[in-house]
Image (cartoon, helix red, strand yellow):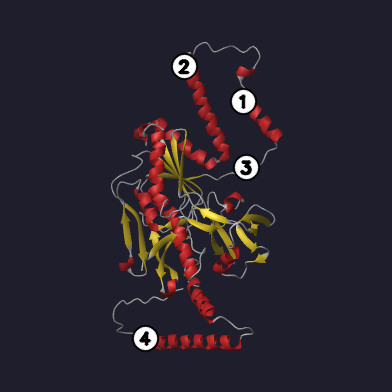
Amino acid sequence: MKKFVMAAIGGTLAGIVATTQFAGPLLAQDSKSSNNVYEQLDLFGDIFERIRAQYVEEVDESELIEAAINGMLTSLDPHSSYLSPDDAADMRVQTRGEFGGLGIEVTQEEGFVKVVSPIDGTPADAAGMEAGDFITHVDGESVLGLTLDEAVELMRGPVGSEIIITVVREGEAEPFDVSIIRDTIKLTAVRTRTEGDTVVLRVTTFNDQTMPNLEEGLAEQIEELGGMDNVNGIVLDLRNNPGGLLTQAIRVSDAFLEKGEIVSTRGRNPQDGDRYNATPGDLADGKPIVVLINGGSASASEIVAGALQDHRRAIVVGTKSFGKGSVQTVMPLRGDGAMRLTTARYYTPSGRSIQALGVSPDIVVEQPRRKPETEEEEEASAARRNRSEADLRGSLDNDSLTEDEIKQIEADRAKAEAAAKLREEDYQLAYAIDILKGLSKLGPDAQ
């Protein structure tokens, strides 16, 4: 039976487990403690029998036991849980990159469901859900008092059906409703494009397709720019990336590091720890890298950001990440169920744990909320921006430049205007690209 090691936010699935570990002979066991455990188990049996015999309605015994097991696991931390056979199958599908749902990664905080991040290109993203949103009601039913798995179950439904989610958002005076149409979620792990001379790698999740997508996409963009010599740097965009497979986070980090530790994990026992090191080879050929993070960047994303930051391989820009520094191991169980159990904490190369603290960016850049303009205001502001000396009646011509020089100036101006437009659409990304432009102007010795 295969174990999956996860470095992602838990809570979108549910499940069960029974595992026995042997760590040597029990030479000195506290008999009093052992007796107390057996007494507690007898108490559990008594309660189970009374519920089965005397509860006001007939109960499903297997569901009752599953609920007890899940309650035991969820009492440990927000990311440990039991996976029923259906949920275990769903999880395996998710790691392959296609599943049905809304397209949000969630956790639980103060009794409510908290959005870790919406996934790019999904119904939740299109509906305007944001990292940090609190979901208080689903189709008018309060989620307060429900377990995370129960709340997630409320949000499930047939593809094409509508769901109304009530959201509390920082900066908004009142809760508001968001309508989302459920759909099949097809994740593209990495989207690539160029902005000027910069390659932008937008990594949305860490699943089986992440590293192959990244290698293929990066190679295509480098070829489009005419070779690595024409690339001024790379933006690795990890914003609103909730994490995923630990193995993929390690491979992405390794892709840009020549040597050194990437991440270490430390379990309850010292012998359970692992250390993962980079292998020679840098897909970026030493070009400068900017990593973008925000409050929706969690777990596997934080591993990558922390590794590249500690090795001074990248400048980290944005806002503080989510702060999930634990690793979950998914252990298959009899009956096709599984148990997701927190088995270790992970540490960045410098030895820091980011659990509950997050990765702090080297340069803090907030994404400003854009105030919508009326059509008249947009036209007026565009006219003000475009007015220049050349628009004045009777202005002198520039007779000191050749036709080719004028064309080059106009081309440079077009690039600058495109950058300005990007700054309005995505200020954090534009800021990252400006950093790479500045480094390229200083030359390789300054990088």
Label whose residue precedes the other's in the sequence (1 or 2): 1
Cα distance between the residues tagged 1 and 2: 23 Å
Query: Mark 1, mark 2: which one is toward the viewer?
Result: 2
Badge 4: how crowded within 10 Å, few (<14), some, or many (20+)?
few
Q: Which residue is mark 4?
A: 30
Cα distance between the residues tagged 4 and 2: 88 Å
Q: Does residue 136 appear left or right of residue 314 in this picture?
A: right
The mark total stands at 4
Query: Mark 4, mark 2: which one is toward the viewer?
Result: 2
Query: Mark 4, mark 3: which one is toward the viewer?
Result: 3
Quick one: 82 or 379, which is closer to the camera?
82
Cα distance between the residues tagged 1 and 4: 81 Å
Is residue 116 visible from the viewing direction of this image?
A: yes
Task: Tell me whether circle 4 and circle 3 mark residues in contact (CB < 8 Å).
Answer: no
Q: Is residue 309 above or below residue 333?
A: above
Q: Position of residue 266 (x, y in %)?
A: 36, 64
Q: Amino acid at mark 2?
A: Asp
Q: Quadrant of residue 339?
A: bottom left
- Residue drawn at (43%, 85%) of the image: 37
Q: Amino acid at mark 1?
A: Asn
> Looking at the rendered structure, which numbered label has been put on residue 386?
1
Q: Amino acid at mark 4?
A: Asp
Q: Which residue is mark 3?
A: 370
> Looking at the rendered structure, which numbered label has been put on residue 108?
none
Cα distance between the residues tagged 2 and 3: 38 Å
Label whose residue precedes the other's in the sequence (2 or 3): 3
Cα distance between the residues tagged 1 and 3: 21 Å
Label whose residue precedes the other's in the sequence (4 or 3): 4
